[in-house]
Image: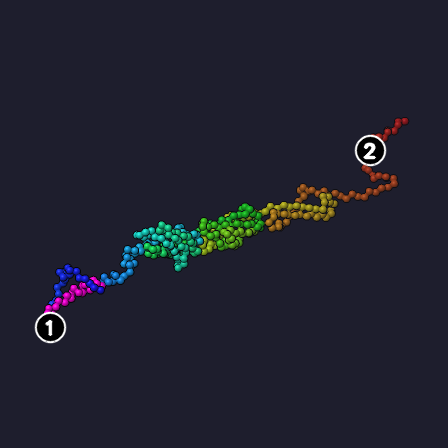
Amino acid sequence: MRLNRPPQAAKNSAPTAETTSPRGHQVRTGLFRVVSVTAVATATCALWALPASAATASAHAKHPSTTSVSFSPTPAWVGQRVRLSAKVKSSGRIPTGTVTFKWAGRTLCVGHLRRGTTSCSTSFGAAGSYLVQGLYSGDATHLRSVGTAREAVRRSPTTTTITNVGGGIIAVGQSHTFDVTVTAPAGTPAPTGTVTFRSGARTLCVVRLSRGTASCVTSFGAAGSYLVKGFYSGNAAHLGSVGTTGVVAGRSPTTTAITGAGAIITVGKSYIFHVTVTSPAGTPAATGTTVSTTTRPRIRATRPTPARRLTASSPWPRRTSPPRPSPHRRPPRAR
């Protein structure tokens, strides 16, 4: 490569050192100026050797970006749908691309940016604290970025309701049904698990929920008022709860019926009465004793009639009084 030295170089050149040659000639080395010109030439050659894209890289550099992540609702219940939102900002144009939401390396959902924002939904299957990352993919004019946020997930509360089927008054020993319903906040799964029914220290029954409902069939062996409680056990998604109801057990009414061989009996003859005591359906058979009474007898007892004796002189039975004359018989004539 040939360098053309400008005319002003002689005037502005640095002082040179002079040496005497063996023949007596003076030589100007120009050492300092040669070094300066060499450095300039090297830099110029380096610029000519770079490609055009690298030479203009500073004009087309990508802008940095920042990503922020948010949740709705927060905190959330286990199993509830949660909306994950991300906003990407930059000093350049509006960022485009995608944001991938991850937790512990697991992809929760992916959202596409629109005017710098995006959102998608997911749910969490257990209670706890979740650190969620929003990874912005970047685009032709923006660099990648990552935003993080922490979401709290809790077990949802429940409400246990017990209903008396057929009313709150029952007969002693009669089978009775209690219906139980366990509800949870909207958007959460139906409660599962068991409900234990107790009255005092006595366990009436243990039932398993199906779609949040179950039934318990039991009975009470003595008359009185009973407070019945239903204890819901809860599960990984729901908290436990207790429902209460009251029931009154009373002695059931009965009907007594007496039957016999007939309405007329003979004095001194053995006679059998049959008695039947009935109670309402579903109650145990009546037990105990019956007491008879004769204050208002409904059965007539008569003496047996003796056999009649007939003779030739007495064509009819003997009477205590003479027979009455017939009204159609003529009276005898007077003499």
Q: Secondary structure at mark 2?
A: loop
Q: Nearer the viewer, residue 166 or 296?
A: 166
Residue at left offset 50%, top offset 52%: 211
- In the rendered view of the protein, which quadrant contains the C terminus? top right
Residue where numbered disc 2 is placed: 324
Q: State the image coordinates of residue 182 (x, y, percent, origin top left).
A: 48, 50
Residue at left offset 51%, top offset 51%: 213
Horizontal side of 23 relative to 176 (left or right) equals: left
Q: Residue furthest top?
A: 335
Horizontal side of 118 relative to 232 (left or right) equals: left
Residue at left offset 38%, top offset 56%: 100
Q: Nearer the viewer, residue 237 or 46?
A: 46
Q: State the image coordinates of residue 315 (x, y, percent, origin top left).
A: 86, 39
Q: State the image coordinates of residue 8 (x, y, percent, origin top left).
A: 15, 59
What residue span does the magenta drawing correspond to? 19-42
Q: Nearer the viewer, mark 1 or mark 2?
A: 1
- In the rendered view of the protein, which quadrant contains the N terminus? bottom left
Please name the amino acid that badge 1 sits on.
Answer: Pro
First in sequence: mark 1 vs mark 2? 1
Task: Bin the neighbour count of mark 1 within 10 Å (Cα to Cα): few under 14, some 14-19, many 20 and up.
Answer: few
